Image: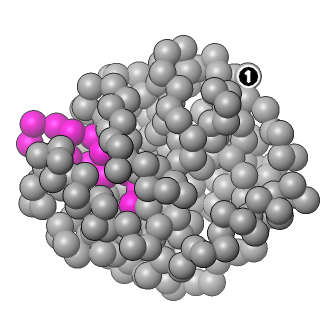
Amino acid sequence: MDLVDVVPGLVMLPLGISNAYVWLEPDGATLVDTGPPGSAPAVRGALEVLGVRREELRQIVLTHYHDDHAGSAADLALWARAPVAAGAGDAPFVRGQEPVPALELTAAEQELHAVVAADLAPAPPCTAVREVTDHDVVAMAGEAVVVAVPGHTPGSIALHLPGPGVLVAGDTIAEHGGAAILGPFNHDRAQAWRSLQRLAALDVDVACFGHGEPIVGDAHRALREATDPLG
C-alpha cells in the first residue's frame, strides 16, 4: 500500500475500493473508516509502518456503515481493543441489528454499482459501537467536530477538524478528476445533496473523501463548485 501524507499528522490509506485515514498524535492514533472486509492486515501493516503500536490505536470512527468502510471494523476493534464510534442513525446497521435500507440509484449509478460492488462481501457486525450525533466532539487534532450528513446513509457523518482546517467527508462527497462531486450510491439523493451543501459551507483548506484523492488547498471552493454528474 502506498500511504499518502495529506497534511502533517493525517495519512490516507488507499484500500482498493475505498480510503481510510489515520490521524497521528504523540500519544496515539485515530483510524477513520476501515475498508472492506479483509482489510485488517493491510491496516495493521500501515499502522506498523507509521510507528503506531496496537495499544496506541485509541479509537475507530466510521463515517457510515457501508461494507467498504465498516467492513473491517469488528476485526480491528478486537485486535486493538479500541472503541468504535458511528453516527446514531447508522449504529443499528453497524451492529447488525437491522436490515439495511435500499439504495436510490440512478441509471448511471446502477451500471457503476454492478461493477464496483460485484465482489464486495458484507461487513461482519461490530457490536460495541458508541453513537455520535451532530456537533459531538471526537478527541483528535485537538477537537474534531461531528457533522451529521444524512442521505448517503441515514446516519452518515463527516469530521471537521477546525485546527488544521481539514474535512473528512466520508462518502457524501467524492473526488473525480480533481473536482468534488456528489458521492454515488445514496439512500436519499436529495438529502445527500443538502448535506453536501452543508459541508460546502465549512471553511476548510483540505478535504478528504472515501473515494478519490484529497483536495489540498482552497478545498472550500472546490466543495462549493461540486456537481452531480451521475444524477
Q: Establish if 120 lies above or below 109.
A: below
Q: Which residues are magenta?
A: 22-34
In front of the other: 97 or 222: 222
In front of the other: 175 or 201: 175
Regarding residue 100, the answer to whether it shows in the image is yes
Residue placed farthest to the front in the image? 1
Q: What colour scheme does the image use?
A: one colour
Q: Establish if 179 lies above or below 110.
A: above
The spot of residue 109 in percent (x, y) is 81, 57
The spot of residue 184 in percent (x, y) is 72, 52
Badge 1 amino acid: Glu
Q: Is residue 31 magenta?
A: yes
Regarding residue 136, the answer to whether it shows in the image is no
Q: Establish if 93 lies above or below 65.
A: below
Q: Residue at x 37, y 29 (%)?
A: 6
Q: Residue at x 49, y 83 (%)?
A: 96
Within 10 Å of disc 1 (Cα), the crowding (few <14, some 14-19, many 20+) is: few
Q: Is residue 80 magenta?
A: no
Residue tagged 1: 225
Q: Residue at x 57, y 73 (%)?
A: 120
Q: Is residue 113 left or right of residue 68?
A: right
- Mark 1 falls on what kind of element? loop
In front of the other: 26 or 175: 175
Would you identify the image quadrant in which residue 124 lies?
Answer: bottom left
Residue placed farthest to the right in the image? 107
**Main SS of the magenta segment?**
strand
The spot of residue 132 in percent (x, y) is 42, 56
